[in-house]
């Protein structure tokens, strides 16, 4: 639940209310008008995204890798340090996990990649092995949950004869099935990789490679659905291992692997294709050449995601939630011809929205001097059903951070007037809809607007009973709401998950 802005008392006498309204700060406070689950009408609630830079023990976390920093349905995200990782939510660190174990080598780094709603997490640990043959890196996966702690899975992947290897897990679904890759070796030489799915119950399940040249293949699974279907990319080789094009694939446990162009030749015709995420409804997102798409595997039907109106080129779809809301990036150009990549959000209800204008004010306070918003790339990694987006922030100035894009309520009343209606004392609130420009309808992200009240600003409860004296009037230009005085001293606005 997201709370927007400061609080104001509701049951104020007329004299006190007039005094407060003379204060422009108090006057601008956002006060939500009703609890949508209890009242017979719905206000035109709007959302903006805020940029949050998580901290662990007061330190911002640099981006550790392209596969880290996933956010789950509880709003928990993973933050990687060198020898530890943390589980972070709403400004608080709930767990800090130390990577050191009894493995007979020196720990180099840890990378926690994915966490599901049951707090099952997977990732990789890298150790430096030193012996008479020299020094080398050994990377293998781990599993973690709060009850069982950190479990090394160093026997899943292959290693060279000297003991060097690289096996990773980087996505876990809600039923505990993960996906990963393992380096392939011909003696000491690396000959690509192999992909697999894994769980404690099934062990390793290999995902067949779709193309091989001279024993060399590269397959990269990106996401796994609750049913166990895997989407990702593989290398379709041209004339050598160094020359290839990237292609999207689908792996179904009962059918094996297939190039998506073979799955649906009419839709997936492209030189370059990717598949980056899949939701529980078996819908997936990715790119076909320079265009982003949403595709329904069950219906074998898809469509392209339109670029923002001022887009300068490529559009990419990185993440998808169960409400078919897509997070990605688009190449944008400003009035001076300067181009860069902005984070975008798309749904059927909203169309494609450039999120950079929501974030520019916060970015100005954290970016290195001389770096503007188009000089940084904010790349979504995942989006949960609450609309929260985990992402990486990168600049050419070697500045990088793990960040969260968080939806917050944007709803200000222009005036609050003490008055009476039908003999009932209360407050008449008025909102000018012109202030909604550039925001996102809360309903499009699955939210309603509600309000909670408290007598001490410590214990809050939703307004659950309908009051027949409440009046609501909404026109194309404004919203008016009359709220009778009640026993509630303080009122605050909240976003609540829509009942439908």
Image: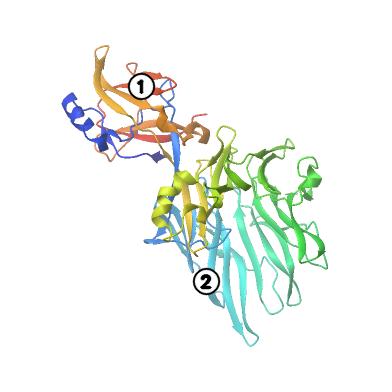
Extreme left residue here? 15
Residue 392 seen in render:
no
Instruction: Estimate the x, y position of residue 83 in percent, counting from the top left.
Output: 48, 69
Instruction: Estimate the x, y position of residue 107 in percent, counting from the top left.
Output: 53, 74
Instruction: Estimate the x, y position of residue 247 in percent, counting from the top left.
Output: 74, 53
Task: Report the quarter where the N terminus lies.
Answer: top left
Colour convention of the picture:
rainbow
Residue at figure coordinates x 79%, y 44% from the top left: 263
Extreme front residue here? 336
Q: Label 2: state its secondary structure.
A: loop
The quarter of the displayed image where residue 246 is located: bottom right
Instruction: Estimate the x, y position of residue 153 in percent, counting from the top left.
Output: 61, 65
Q: Is residue 33 above or below residue 468?
A: below
Residue, disc 2: 101
The quarter of the displayed image where residue 428 is located: top left
Q: Mark on residue 480?
A: 1
The quarter of the displayed image where residue 168 is located: bottom right
Q: Label 1: state its secondary structure.
A: strand
The span from disc 1 to disc 2 (Cα, nearest Å) is 62 Å
């Amino acid at each position: 639940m997201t709370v927007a802005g400061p609080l104001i008392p509701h049951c104020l006498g007329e004299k006190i209310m007039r005094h407060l309204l003379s204060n422009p700060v108090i006057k601008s406070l956002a006060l939500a008008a009703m609890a949508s689950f209890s009242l017979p009408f719905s206000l035109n609630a709007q959302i903006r995204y805020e940029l949050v830079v998580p901290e662990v023990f007061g330190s911002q976390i640099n981006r550790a890798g392209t596969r880290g920093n996933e956010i789950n349905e509880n709003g928990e995200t993973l933050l990687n340090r060198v020898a530890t990782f943390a589980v972070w939510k709403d400004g608080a660190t709930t767990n800090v996990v130390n990577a050191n174990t009894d493995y007979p080598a020196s720990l180099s780094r840890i990378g926690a990649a994915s966490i599901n709603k049951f707090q099952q997490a997977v990732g990789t640990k890298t150790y430096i092995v030193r012996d008479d043959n020299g020094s080398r890196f050994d990377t293998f996966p781990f599993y973690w949950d709060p009850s069982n702690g950190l479990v090394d899975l160093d026997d899943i992947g292959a290693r060279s004869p000297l003991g060097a290897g690289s096996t990773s897990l980087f996505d876990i679904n809600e039923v505990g099935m993960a996906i990963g890759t393992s380096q392939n070796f011909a003696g000491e030489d690396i000959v690509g990789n192999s992909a697999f799915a894994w769980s404690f119950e099934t062990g390793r399940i290999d995902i067949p490679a779709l193309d091989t040249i001279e024993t060399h293949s590269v397959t990269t699974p990106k996401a796994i659905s609750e049913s166990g279907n895997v989407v990702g990319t593989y290398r379709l080789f041209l004339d050598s291992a160094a020359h290839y094009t990237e292609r999207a694939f689908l792996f179904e446990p009962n059918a094996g692997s297939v190039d998506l162009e073979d799955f649906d030749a009419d839709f997936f015709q492209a030189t370059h294709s990717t598949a980056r995420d899949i939701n529980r409804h078996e819908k997936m997102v990715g790119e076909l050449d320079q265009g982003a798409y949403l595709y329904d595997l069950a219906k074998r039907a898809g469509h392209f995601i339109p670029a923002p109106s001022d887009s300068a080129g490529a559009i990419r779809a990185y993440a998808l939630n169960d409400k078919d809301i897509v997070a990605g990036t688009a190449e944008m150009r400003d009035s001076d011809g300067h181009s860069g990549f902005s984070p975008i959000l798309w749904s059927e209800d909203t169309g494609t929205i450039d999120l950079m204008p929501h974030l520019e004010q916060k970015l100005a306070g954290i970016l290195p001097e001389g770096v503007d918003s188009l000089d940084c790339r904010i790349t979504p990694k995942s989006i949960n059903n609450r609309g929260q987006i985990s992402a990486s922030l990168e600049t050419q100035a070697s500045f990088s951070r793990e960040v969260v894009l968080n939806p917050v309520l944007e709803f200000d009343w222009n005036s609050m007037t003490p008055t009476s209606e039908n003999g009932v004392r209360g407050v008449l609130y008025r909102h000018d809809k012109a202030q909604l420009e550039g925001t996102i309808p809360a309903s499009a992200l699955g939210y309603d607007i509600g309000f909670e009240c408290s007598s001490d600003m410590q214990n809050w409860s939703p307004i659950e009973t309908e009051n027949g004296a409440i009046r609501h009037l909404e026109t194309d230009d404004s919203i008016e709401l009359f709220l009778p005085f009640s026993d509630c001293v303080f009122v605050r606005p909240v976003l609540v998950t829509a009942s439908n």
